[in-house]
Amino acid sequence: MVTSLGADPCLGADGGRPEAFRLRSRRERSAATRCEQASARRRPHVAHWRKWLVVGPVLIYACVLVLAPLSALLVGACSEGLGGLFAAPADPAFLRALWLTVAIGAVVLAVHAASGTVLAWVLVRHQFRGKRWLDAAVNLPFAVSPVVVGYMLFLLFGRSGILSPLAQRLGVQVVFAVPGMVLATLFVTLPFTVRELVPVLRAFGTDQEEAASTLGASGWQTFRSVTLPALRWGLVYGMTLTFARALGEFGAVLVVGGGIEGRTETATLYVYRALDERQYVAAYSAALVLGLMSLLLVAATELLKHRTPRAEE
C-alpha cells in the first residue's frame, strides 16, 4: 500500500492511532499526573519553609528587643536572692513615686482622650489654612528630645521666665512641681492618640454621619452614636500607648521636676536615684515593675480586642 503525501505515519490503517502509541500516551499521561500530584504535595512544605525563613528572623528580632531587657532586669533583681524582686515594691519611697507616676499618667490620659480626639477630627474633617503645619507639629515630640522639652518649660516658667508672672498670678508653681511634670508629659505623649485616630477617621468616611444627619440626628448625637463606636479601638490603642509612654517618661520630668524625693520623684526617677546610690537590686526591681506594667497593658489591650465578638466590631 502506498502512503499518500502528507499522511501521518503514526496513524493506523483506519486513520486512528496505533495501539502501542495509545498505550504509551496513557502511560505518559499517568506519569505526568503522578508528577503533578507529587509536586502539589511538596508545594505546601516549600511554602511553609519559605514563610518561616521570613517570619523566623522577625520573631527572633522582636524577642531580643523585648524579652532580653526584661530577662536582664529579672536576673539583676534576683542577683541577691528572690527577695530582690520585692525590694522596690516593699519600699515606701517607690510606692509614692509609682503613685505619682500613675496619677500624672491618668491626668494626661484624660486630657488626650478629649483633646486628641478633637484634634484628629479637625485634621481629617476640616480644611483650613495652616493645616499642614498643624499636622506636622503633632509629630514634633518624636523629633525633640524630652530633655529639651523640660528645659524649655524651665525657661518659660522659671523665676525669670516669660510666663512666670502669669503662673504667679494664678498661684500655680510649675517648675519643680507636679504641674510642670504634667505639662512635660502632655507634650511628649501628644502624637499617640492623634496618630491612631486619624487613619481610622479617614477609613470610616462620612457616609454614615451624613445619613444620621439626614435622619435628624444632631451633631453630638451623630458623634456619640455613629462616629465614636467606629473610633473605639483606635482610641483604646492611642490611650494605651499614651499611658505606657507616660509611665516611662524620664528626661522631661527630671529637668522640670528636679526629682525631689517624696515630692516630684516619679518611678523612673526612683530608678535613677537608686542607681546613683548604688542600690542596684532596688533599681532593677523598680525597672522590672515598670516594664511589666507597660507590657501587660499592651497585651491586655490586644487580648481584649481579639475576644470582642465580630458583630460588635
Image: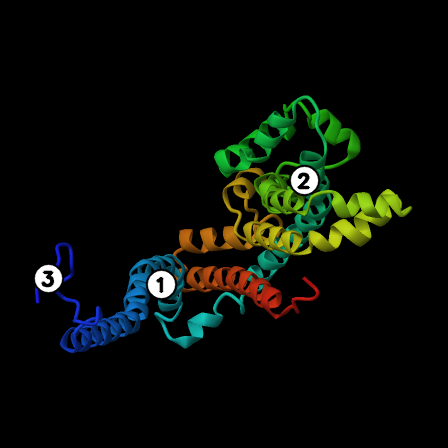
- Relative to 33, say whether 65 is above or below: above
Q: Amino acid at mark 2?
A: Ala
At horizontal 69% and vertical 26% (from top left) the residue drawn is 163
Q: Residues within 10 Å of mark 3 (few under 14, many from 20)?
A: few
Q: Quadrant of the N terminus?
A: bottom left
Residue toward you, 228 or 13? 13
Say which residue label 2 marks.
Answer: 120
* Quarter-of-image position of residue 312: bottom right
Spatial separation of the CA atoms under disc 2 and disc 3: 86 Å
Q: Is residue 124 left or right of residue 261?
A: right
Q: Check contact, mark 1 vs mark 2: CB within 8 A.
A: no
Q: Nearer the viewer, mark 1 or mark 3?
A: 3
Q: Amino acid at mark 1?
A: Ala
Q: Is residue 91 left or right of residue 24?
A: right
Residue toward you, 21 or 44? 21
Mark drawn on residue 3: 3
- Relative to 99, say whether 27 is above or below: below
Q: Earlier in the sequence, mark 2 or mark 3?
A: 3
